[in-house]
Image (cartoon, grey):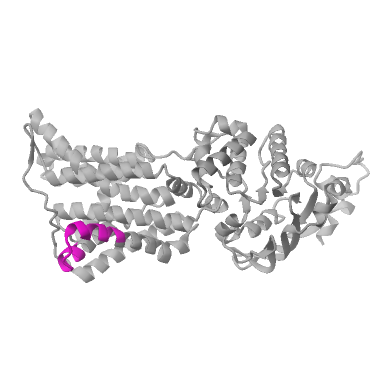
Amino acid sequence: MDWVFLSELAINGALTGLLYSLFAIGLVLIYKASSVPNLAQGGLTMVGAYVVLALSHDAGLPLWLAIPLAAVIMFGLGFGIERVALRRLAGRPVIMILMLTLGLDIFLRGTTLAIWGGTSRSIELGVSYEPLFLGDLFISRIHLVGAGVAVALFVAFMLFFRTRTGIKLRAIADDYMASWSVGISVEHGVGLSWALASVVAVATGVIWGEIQGVDQALSLLLLKGLTVAVLGGLDSILGAIVAGIILGVIENVGAEFLDPLVGGGSRELIVAAVLILTVMIRPHGLFGRHDIERV
Amino acid sequence: MQEKAEAAPILSMNSVEVLYDNIMLAIKGVSIQVPTGEMIALLGSNGAGKSTTLKAISGLLKAERGRISRGEIAFQGTDITEVLAQNRVGMGICHVIEGRRVFEHLTPDENLTAAAPRGMSRSALNAEKEKIYNYFPRLAERRNSQAGYLSGGEQQMLAIGRALVTQPSLLMLDEPSLGLAPFLVEEIFGILQKINREEGMSVLLVEQNALAALEIVSQGYLIENGRVVMHGTAEALKSNSDIQEFYLGGGEGTNFHNVKHYSRRKRWLS
């Protein structure tokens, strides 16, 4: 095993990992504002990609217009989900909201299947498939673009959570009742977090749609995204980025060694092992908030 | 004092009944009035309906599936029975809920920011924060640490400070003395009194610690079993023998050998 090959595996793994981070950021946004892991993020991502396709391929808009427009539509959809479904459950046990997001995911998958069918379609972002050579290293351009988007969103949201609106969202995640008591509109805050997560879903859907095509499989990103979010600590955007890189590298390098031994498919096993071990050993993840217990 | 009491009350609650889950009657026709600019105490034992009364006024009942089934609440002359909790805060009612409930994962400074009303300018917010840090110098020292790790007293101060950011004209506090050392209770009550005097803010204080509460308020209501059973000035309540025995810990020189317990029940409990 030579070092060039190993670092190439690691770098491409890290880039793929940042694409998982992109997905995980959507999960973290909602968790930060309502303490609920959103199991529908996979469905939202897929819907985001389909909306972009509908606007560009079907309606004939150029991509530079279709993507922002899709972001606006999805922003509205996020607010709509809160208004129609989540508002009734505000203050109910988390498990009920969790089940609701699961139902929503199934609903979104069913809807996209009914409208757009099951065949895979592609989004042409116009990024060259020519690999980029960094010395001897060989790097995928689209992964690089996606990783750039992930880092840009990371910076944007880090800044956002320091603004007054961002602080109010974090306050809502801490305590609904106390938020109401000082006049914070919990409903509006949760809606905003869903809207922002839906916008992130468009970015995720476009990048992943370019890489693996747009079809039902896009919603399965949830498994890796959730693993990254849990490893990073569910409410930490920095955690999502760091954990994405870690998971990507472990997965890419690990699979290279394990695949020959088990005859392929070890990627999924590695992801599953990371998820299970995180929950067992460090349930609040790398950067997640601890539940404060004062004695 | 006499003139103040005759001015229009900032809050008037008229035979209000509250139902939880449509079946449990938590308060049964409570009427209270808070004269503008005064401090009023609601006293009573556990489960008497004091907290429910405050939640009915702040609108937080809804979050616990409670509702006002009868009566009405007027704030500054406007009926607010149907107004949403968050809009009541905008009107000037702020409720410091029981158990402090600071935003644990935020810093004290962020806790204050979170409560800023919509449209408050940055400079106004900073001025407000400075004012609050002046009232509570302990908070100023710890403004950038995590609120969850503040001491109980500091958290209570933060909860009050957070409520002050909303610029209330009626501040309601639910058991601010709970679990605090007596010297802290004294300090916090002293500050409340100062705020009440300096800003003319009306205060409605729910307390089990009647002894401490009656020192700073002008009037008190005693609630038992969801009903107001006694109302009077702080002086009158302090000298009432029932209050002394049940809430202030024994009357003067009671000889316990001679007390006939069965005859000294809380007989207003019907």
Along the viewing direction, whichever of B157 and A264 lies nearer the viewer: B157
In the rendered structure, does residue A64 fall within the stretch colored magenta?
Answer: yes
Along the viewing direction, whichever of A74 and B46 lies nearer the viewer: A74
Q: Is residue A294 above or below residue B21?
A: above
Residue extending farthest right: B258
Residue extending farthest bottom: A114
The overriding secondary structure of the stretch rendered in magenta is: helix
In the picture provided, is B134 more to the left or to the right than B198?
Answer: left
Quarter holding the C terminus of chain B?
A: bottom right
Question: Residue A135: x, y in percent?
Answer: 7, 31
Picture quarter containing residue A275?
A: top left
Magenta stretch in the rendered image: A53-72
Question: Residue A148: x, y in percent?
Answer: 22, 43
- Number of numbered discs overlaid on the protein picture: 0
Q: Is residue A293 visible?
A: no
Residue at position x 82%, y 41% in the image: B249
Question: Residue B263: x, y in percent?
Answer: 89, 53
Residue at position x 13%, y 37% in the image: A9
Question: Residue A41: x, y in percent?
Answer: 30, 55
In the rendered structure, does residue A180 fall within the stretch colored magenta?
Answer: no
Residue at position x 24%, y 52% in the image: A204
In the picture provided, is A163 more to the left or to the right than A6?
Answer: right
Q: Is residue B11 visible?
A: yes
